Image (cartoon, helix red, strand yellow):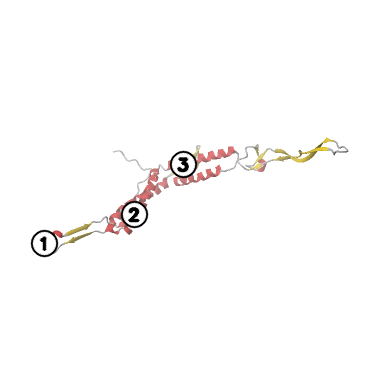
Amino acid sequence: MAEKKPTQLHALLAVEADLTNTAKAVLEETVTTFAKKPDHFRGHVKAVTYFNEARVQENEREEKKLVTTVDDKLEFTLDHVARLYDALLQKEEANQRAKIDLVIDGEVIGTDLPATFLLGLENRLKSVHQTILTAPTLDPSLIWEEDQNAGEGVYRSTPQVSKRTEKDTQFKVLAAATDKHPAQIEKWTVDVPVAKIETTHVSGMWTPAKKAEVLARVDKLMNAVKKARQMANTVEVDKIQVGQKIKDYLLGA
């Protein structure tokens, strides 16, 4: 007969929710039965015997058997509870041994990290990823250069040059004045440049390239954490048990 393969922590984690839900449902059903279905625990035997032997054929016997007993009900219920307790105990004990190094590109950035920490880190890094996704980037319509004098992460655009104009009225004589008619003059306005406007933009936003680079780093870190957590959860589970002893104590067995 082939030797049974030891259970690994990830397999236990996969059934924990089912064991929890089953134990919860069985406990709730037992409470309902105890509180609202007392007839499950009651039975009787009723016999009707006539004194007159001539009516012996009219004698009656009625029996209502027990559906269950409190002992049997609690035995069934606490069996499920005991299995859950054992699973939780085994999980917690295995979690104390489920540790692993976090490695990215061959570099160890964390030593003996617990699997439970890695699971939390994996979820929290999703929020970091979403935050970085919202980071604003430099206007691609401008040309930017890093401004070392202003500090790290500060960019300055090449000057944007434009002109300020003012309206100037111009006119032209179409017909000179005579002693009978005034001069005919055409008027119009034109925009005349009066000043140069030079605008240099300063920004503390990221370049699109840097944003993409950091997002890639977050993705790589998330993948490394997930891989480490999965590897840590391959630790074998010791078949330690306490559920049966708890049940026996409660029932006075």
Closest to the observer: 220 or 100? 220
| Whether residue 167 is situated above or below residue 28 in the rendered picture | above
Mark 3 or mark 2: name the one nearer the start of the chain: 2
* Any part of residue 242 in sight: no
The kind of residue on which mark 1 rests is Ala
> In this image, 193 relative to 33: left or right?
right
Question: Which amino acid is tagged 2?
Answer: Glu
> Quadrant of the rendered structure where residue 179 is?
top right
Disc 3: which residue: 226
Q: Can residue 36 be seen in this view?
A: yes
C-alpha gap between disc 1 and disc 3: 87 Å
Q: Nearer the viewer, residue 216 or 61?
A: 61
Closer to the chain start, of discs 1 and 2, is 2
Quarter of the rendering containing residue 175: top right
Name the residue carrying label 2. Answer: 29
Q: How far apart are marks 1 and 2 (CA)?
A: 50 Å
Q: Residues within 10 Å of mark 2 (few under 14, many from 20)?
A: few
Q: What residue type is disc 3 on?
A: Lys
